[in-house]
Image: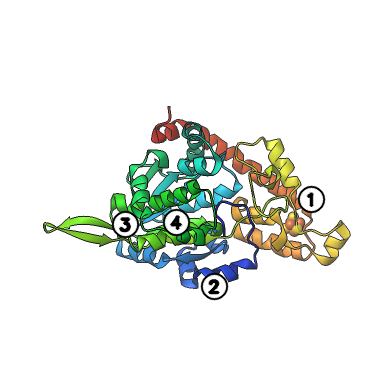
Amino acid sequence: MDPWSSSNILDEDYERLINEFGIERISDIMRQKLLKNRFIRRKIIFGHRSLEDIFKAVEKKEPWAVMSGIKPSGPFHLGTLTTALEIVEFQKLGGKAYYCIADIESWEDNGIPYEEAGETSVDNLADILALGLDPSPKKAYIWRQSKEDIVKDVCFKVGRLLTLNMVNAIYGEKPFGLYLAALIQVGDIILPQVLDGVQPTVVPVGIDQDPHIRLTRDLTRRYYKEIKKNGKIIQQEFFLPGATYHKLLPGLDGSDKMSKRNPNSYFTFNESFESIEKKIKGAVTGGRRNKKEQQELGGEPQKCMIYKILMYHFEDDDDKLAEDFEKCVKGELLCGEHKRDCIEKVLKYIKEHRKKKEKLIDKAREILKVE
Ligand code: SF4
């Protein structure tokens, strides 16, 4: 898995990844506890690491953190929406949200200068505020990597624990800046514990980001904070940061993955409605060659991007989703009709989102201190 490339992960690969990298499955008990979370309920989140630490903290009414972020390299899009909604969901469950603007990564990966990333960050942050993230200081901490001493400090400290062979084994051969960005991310992920005390943390990510989680857990095992207790300096160990993993959305047009290099594979939240509509109309479906065949053989919703985007984001009603699946398989639902329904839902969602977002741009500017 390469967190910086656009290689696809197929449905059949998830089982192999679970076994190969020691990812734990979401148990039925966990699913029951998190039924309000659509991604858990619909099995889009399929695995985790150390999620039980969060449940223990919830039970004992102890603090816990949810950490996530965005690389400010462009407008919010369908792919970034999943992680953003996950952090909002965990915050609602009682975790303090730690949200990072990964502008060092956008420089190292995309060559975007910090000033330019600043403007994009304001836009991205306004999006997540519109999705429901509560930015009040008791409930959230939001930072830009380039302005946050803690993450740079952790990067220098853990740097001495790492050899080129180790990073090579995790990421393969990459420009050195990406290795640095990975170490900065280690700082992002353990920032909640450095800043607000040792506590369990969950990082909701797409499965392609697991290399960062493994690196962070590995380094956290050897990282500690020195604190003074009864006049003595003692070493305080950290919780190993946990994670939840969601399945990635493939490209709308049937390409491997939603990717900026291929604008037809996704749409952004800032795009014109005409363009969004055109892309949804052009999305690959699991439909048959013609109406007659569809009615005879039924469609294949499990392969269909219309079904997938409705399931991830735009259909709130579980029963309707299940009903449409059935109707498609039985040949009772046709793709044209279903696409029209999908376009209507997507445009309604984005219209409402933009209205909320407009009012939050100044707030985002103020939080990020971007003039
Ligand atoms: S009917 Fe709907 S779910 Fe079935 S293949 Fe067509 S668009 Fe996809």
**x, y percentage for residue 146?**
41, 39
Tell me whether the residue at label 1 lies in contact with that at label 2, contact meaning CB atoms closer than 8 angstroms: no
Residue under label 3, please give it: 63
Residue at 58 percent across and 62 percent down: it is 42
Query: Of discs 4 and 3, which sits in the foreground?
Result: 4
* Badge 4 amino acid: Val
Gap in Å between the C-alphas at discs 4 and 3?
15 Å
Query: Of discs 1 and 2, which sits in the foreground?
Result: 2
Residue at 35 percent across and 49 percent down: it is 156
Quarter holding ligand 1: bottom right
Q: Residue furthest left?
A: 231
Tell me whether the residue at label 2 lies in contact with that at label 3, contact meaning CB atoms closer than 8 angstroms: no
Toward the viewer: 312 or 75? 75
Instruction: Check disc 2 and report its element: helix, strand or loop.
Output: helix
Instruction: Check disc 3 and report its element: helix, strand or loop.
Output: loop
Q: Is residue 242 above or below residue 315?
A: below
Residue at 79 percent across and 61 percent down: it is 332
Side (left or right) of 64 relative to 282: left
